[in-house]
Structure formats: C-alpha cells, structure tokens
Image (spheres, rainbow, N blue to C red):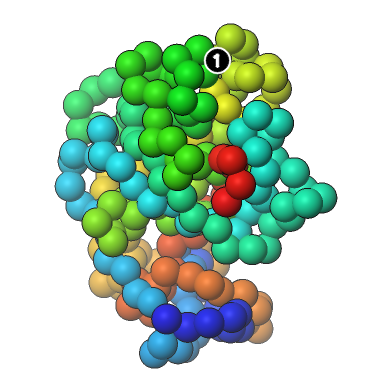
Amino acid sequence: MLAGRNTVESSTYYIHPGWNGVVSNANDIAIIGLDTLAPIEADRYNIYRGGDELGQNFTVVGYGRSGNGETGSDPINFPSGIKRYGYNTYDYGSYPQNQQANAFKVLGYDFDSGLERNNTPPGDTGLGMVEVGTASGDSGGPAFINQLVAGITSFSRTFGQPRDVNNKLDFSFGEIAYSTRVSHYANFIDDVLAGEIAPNRTVPEPSTVLGTVFTLSALTISSHFRKKVKQKL
C-alpha cells in the first residue's frame, strides 16, 4: 500500500455519453487517463461484474466529512481530507426510477440507526456501529464487494421525517445514498481501456490531478458527488 499523497499528471478524460449533469438521471461516471503509470506501490482493483449486488454488504471508502448519525456531518470537528471507511448494504436499485431486474444504473442504501423508524426500506435496521453513510467530499470514492469496485459514490437524498432524524439533508440517520453501479458500465470501462472510445477532451498542457485512486491499468474511475456519516468514523 502506498502511503500519503502522490501527484500524477493527466491530460485526457472520458465522460460517459449518457451523462447530462443530473446525478439522479444516472450515468455519473468518467475515466481519467493518466499520462504515466501510477506508482507501482499504489493499490489496484478490478471491477465487479456480477448482477447480484442487492442485499450484499460492501465497504465504502472516502475522504469526505464525518460526524454523527444523530446530528449529521460536522465540517468543523470532522473535516474532509481524511481517509475513512465503513460498511453498509445495498438495499435497492434504480434505472434510475424503476426496479427492472439487472437494469439498474444506480444502487441505493440507507443510513440505519438501528431503529425501525429510521429504516428505508423496512425490515433491515442495519449493521450496527460499523455502518456508515456518505457525505460531502466523498465524490467518486469506491464501494467494494469482495475487493472489487462495485460502486462509485454519487449522490444522497432525504425523504424527510419520520425516516430522516432531523428532516434535512445533512447525511444523518434515515437518509439515502446512491452509488453508480459499476457492473452496468463494464462495457464502457472496457472500451475505454481498449482504446475504442476517444477522449472527450485532451488538454494541451496536462493538468495536475491529485490521486489516491483505485487504478484500472493506467486509468482511474472518477465521479461527481458525496459521502454520508455514522457514529464516528
């Protein structure tokens, strides 16, 4: 494992053709091309290609805010920039708005307090103290099933009380987080890596990209949104 941060130059990126700037419409995935290989010491992960994510526990990693599920994220005492991780369970999928089997583009999970009143959907009150949600600053972070990248942190929603403990979107108990479902985009990823898709842009002078990244060969998966919080990560 490579400790600390490393700077890697990047001059190309590949945005999914279905991305329209609205996270709830899915397709929130892009690939950044690195000008040189990531350091050999950097961890590398393959992607999850199965169709059975629902009901599975996963490990989510991010550098966003932390805090307490009762009060939400705390940018003062638990600011972004620190690597944190925890666990949750994928509860449902969305296409983005139906339940068609194996057509899901987005995977959703709730941030359980252990109490049924904060649980969505009913029946599973969570994993206890190890359960987390995602919050601001966790954009593009990976969710792992069996050490494979199954999700990319995308966005969060609140459906208000009684599920949400305080009726506002602050990454507290009862809110819902969504991951881009990587298995749905496996062909897009494969085609980019195979050189079959042209980049959306090639920057004349490479911009600097800070990367603690999970690398796929010389490329990294990116995204656009957030992480929640638990007791204290």
Task: Please give the name of the residue rendered at 19% of the width and 26% of the height, measured from the top-left corner.
Answer: 101
In percent of width and height, residue 219 lies at 41, 73
**Viewer-proximal residue, 47 or 134?**
134
Question: Given the current orientation, which residue lies at the most extreme right position?
Answer: 76
Vertical relation: 169 (above or below) 21 = above
Image coordinates of residue 28 in percent, x first then y, are 48, 45
Q: Give the vertical position of 169 relative to 184 (above or below).
A: above
Picture quadrant where residue 68 is located: top right
Residue on which disc 1 sits: 163
In-image side of 191 versus 200 (left or right): left
Residue 212 makes an appearance in the image: yes
Name the side, left or right, on which 134 lies relative to 128.
right
What residue is shown at x 39% (from left), y 90% (from top)? 40
Q: Is residue 94 visible?
A: no
SS class, disc 1: loop
Q: Position of residue 174 (x, y in %)?
A: 54, 23
Q: Please state which amino acid type lies under the numbered disc 1.
A: Arg
Between 93 and 175, the one nearer to me in the picture: 175
Res 90 → quadrant:
top left
Q: Residue at x 68, y 34 (%)?
A: 72
In the displayed structure, 110 sits above or below 51; it is: above
Q: Is residue 116 above or below residue 11?
A: above
Q: Position of residue 209 (x, y in %)?
A: 61, 75
Q: Could you tell me which residue is drawn at 65 percent across and 78 percent down?
A: 207
Q: Is residue 200 left or right of residue 122?
A: right
Q: How many marks?
A: 1
